[in-house]
Image (cartoon, rainbow, N blue to C red):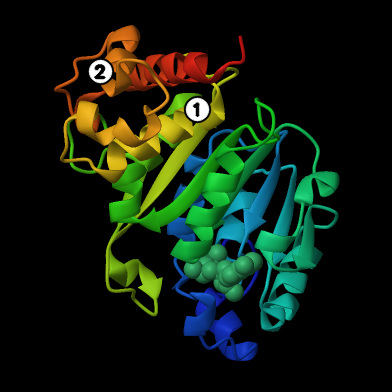
Amino acid sequence: MATIDGLPPLREVIATHDLRARKALGQNFLLDLNLTARIARAAGDLGGADVLEVGPGPGGLTRGLLAEGARRVLAIEKDARCLPALAEIAARYPGRLEVLNADALEIDPRAHLDAPIRVVANLPYNVGTELLIRWLTPPDWPPFWDSLTLMFQKEVAQRITARPGSGAYGRLAILSQWRTEARMVMTLPPEAFVPAPKVHSAVVHLKALPAPRFPADPRALETVVAAGFNQRRKMLRAALKGISQHIPGGAEALLDSAGLAPTARAEEIDLEGFCALARAWAATRSPC
Ligand code: SAM
């Protein structure tokens, strides 16, 4: 029985092309086209946008993106077995789907895309986190993309969107929220995938802000955040000792110039506080 886009159902696609899921490639496929359309809609208005999809697999999400009106989709897939299934989708949407058989960690897709660019992916979690960090730390801001809509383990999605005071709040929350608006937009049970993973998943939508929320040098911010959270149970005056050895008055003086209490813990410090700390620390490093 044909589906809404006239292509075969995904179970049939998988059987026809013998796409048995491979664990080594983190393959957990979404087979429900209503669900993939919902994920595509969570990416925002796709009309007039190019979409970078990483890890299209048999193409469920790809079909959602095209049906929801993406101007063009560039899909990067490592597993060559998926190419014939993706070629059928390209034939159904002439000129709108380009597929690259490549490792997304080793390719720069920018030459293939025109702005505005939205990134959408249901990726193996380790690859997804590594790509997220790369996408969030380009040499210049704003980045090449306007938004990222990414599936993660729910626990990782919680760390991306966590607020101060919660156990999930840490480096990933600060890195994500400093320069994007990050929201968890959907949660999915294991049964949404074939094969079912062990844990729940969630889709996170990150919209790039035109500029960081608060000024700070990215490397200085990373340094103070890493020091603060590496010993998250300690008070900051102890946790920051290692990065304050060159400062007269040590960590207490550093915290004082950032306007932060020496007895506070990293978990209680909001983005504004960490950016103030990064500026204060950077000022102690500047050549006079
Ligand atoms: N998007 C499809 C879906 O939602 O049903 C497939 C999702 S499956 C979780 C992850 C996909 O990413 C697989 O097709 C896998 O082959 C592909 N993949 C894994 N590592 C990759 C990499 N480094 N670069 C590109 N694709 C990769």
Q: Vertical placement of 148 versus 179: above or below?
A: below
Disc 1 residue crowd, few under 14, some 14–19, many 20+, Cα 10 Å: many
Q: Residue at x 28, y 10 (%)?
A: 256
Is residue 181 something that shows in the picture? Answer: no
Is residue 94 found left or right of 271 in the rendered image? right
Q: Are dots 2 and 1 in contact, CB under 8 Å?
A: no
Residue behind label 2 places its C-beta within 8 angstroms of ligand 1? no
Is residue 243 something that shows in the picture? Answer: yes
Disc 2 residue crowd, few under 14, some 14–19, many 20+, Cα 10 Å: many
Q: Residue at x 72, y 66 (%)?
A: 89
Using the image, tell me which numbered label, if any, was put on residue 220: 1
Q: Residue at x 53, y 55 (%)?
A: 130
Is residue 274 found left or right of 261 in the rendered image? right
Amino acid on which the number 2 mark rests in the picture: Glu
The number of numbered discs placed on residues in the rendered structure image is 2
Q: Residue 139, located in which quarter of the rendered image?
A: top right
Kindly identify which residue carries mark 2.
252
Considering only order in the chain, which callout, 1 or 2, is on the residue closer to the N terminus? Answer: 1
Nearest to the eye among marks 2 and 1: give it: 2
Per the image, label 1 sits on a secondary structure element best described as helix
Quarter holding the C terminus is: top right
Using the image, tell me which numbered label, if any, was put on residue 288: none
Q: Residue at x 39, y 80 (%)?
A: 195
Q: Position of residue 174 (x, y in %)?
A: 39, 32
Q: Position of residue 144 (x, y in %)?
A: 71, 35
Amino acid on which the number 1 mark rests in the picture: Ala
Q: Vertical placement of 114 versus 99: above or below?
A: above
Q: Position of residue 65 (x, y in %)?
A: 61, 51
Quarter of the render that holds ligand 1: bottom right
Quarter holding the N terminus is: bottom right
